[in-house]
Image (cartoon, helix red, strand yellow):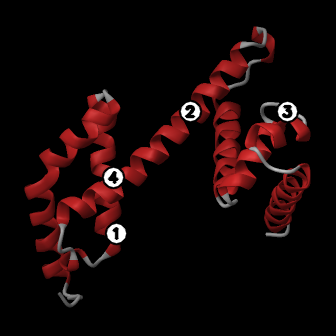
Amino acid sequence: MPHNADPRVQQSAMHALYSDNHHWLYTWIRKRLDNHFDAADLTQDTFLRIHARQDVDTITQPRAYLMTVAKGIVSHFYRRKSLEDTYLEYIALFPDPVTSSQEQQQIILQTLEQIDALLNELPRHVKTVFLMSQIEGKKYQTIANELGMSLISVKRHMKQAYVQCLTLMEEDFFE
């Protein structure tokens, strides 16, 4: 189906997509989250992401498309929640004087999200090796043994991860 740039056609297509599929998508997401507030938010986020595309009239398989977009949003939600939970567990280990303000916590959480986004740009094996080394504190030989790869491969993956981190840090510094 050809794309129609007419805003009225797009608005009508979006309205039809929303009214025909909102309840179904909410139910689908709700089963995965076990929290109706988050499910409602992520349902809306899914429709907002689709609305931003401006080619709603070209969607031929609406439920499959909605499910694909929603899977990405749910995955991002769980990644963010995992980061938040890990951070909260970490700061709970410190005595009260070390705990930070809401603003500081938000800055730290945003930094963790940026690091997570950076790591998601790495190939899967590189990211796994980097996390095992930096987060779990494992030695390169242990990582090689656990992943069934050579020590040289582990070192190569770590170098690739460090180069990526440094490149992105330099880009941020010079912006």
In terms of image quadrants, where is residue 67?
A: bottom left
In terms of image quadrants, where is residue 86?
A: top right
Q: CA distance from mark 3 to mark 1?
A: 43 Å
Residue drawn where x is 68% and y is 60% of the image: 123
Which of labels 1 and 2 is toward the front?
Answer: 2
Cβ–Cβ under 8 Å for marks 1 and 2 = no
Residue drawn where x is 69% and y is 14% of the image: 92
| Residue 49 percent coordinates (x, y) | 35, 62
Question: Against 107, is 84 above or below?
Answer: above
Residue at which label 2 appears: 82
Q: CA distance from mark 3 to mark 4?
A: 35 Å
Q: CA distance from mark 4 to mark 1?
A: 14 Å
Residue at which label 4 appears: 70
Which of labels 4 and 1 is toward the front?
Answer: 4
Cβ–Cβ under 8 Å for marks 3 and 4 = no
Q: Earlier in the sequence, mark 2 or mark 4?
A: 4
Which image quarter holds the C terminus?
Answer: bottom right
Residue drawn where x is 63% and y is 46% of the image: 113
| Residue 78 percent coordinates (x, y) | 48, 38
Q: Earlier in the sequence, mark 3 or mark 4?
A: 4
Q: CA distance from mark 1 to mark 2?
A: 27 Å
Cβ–Cβ under 8 Å for marks 3 and 1 = no
Going by the numbered disc 3, the residue's amino acid type is Lys
Q: Residues within 10 Å of mark 3 (few under 14, many from 20)?
A: some
Which of labels 3 and 4 is toward the front?
Answer: 3
Residue at which label 1 appears: 52
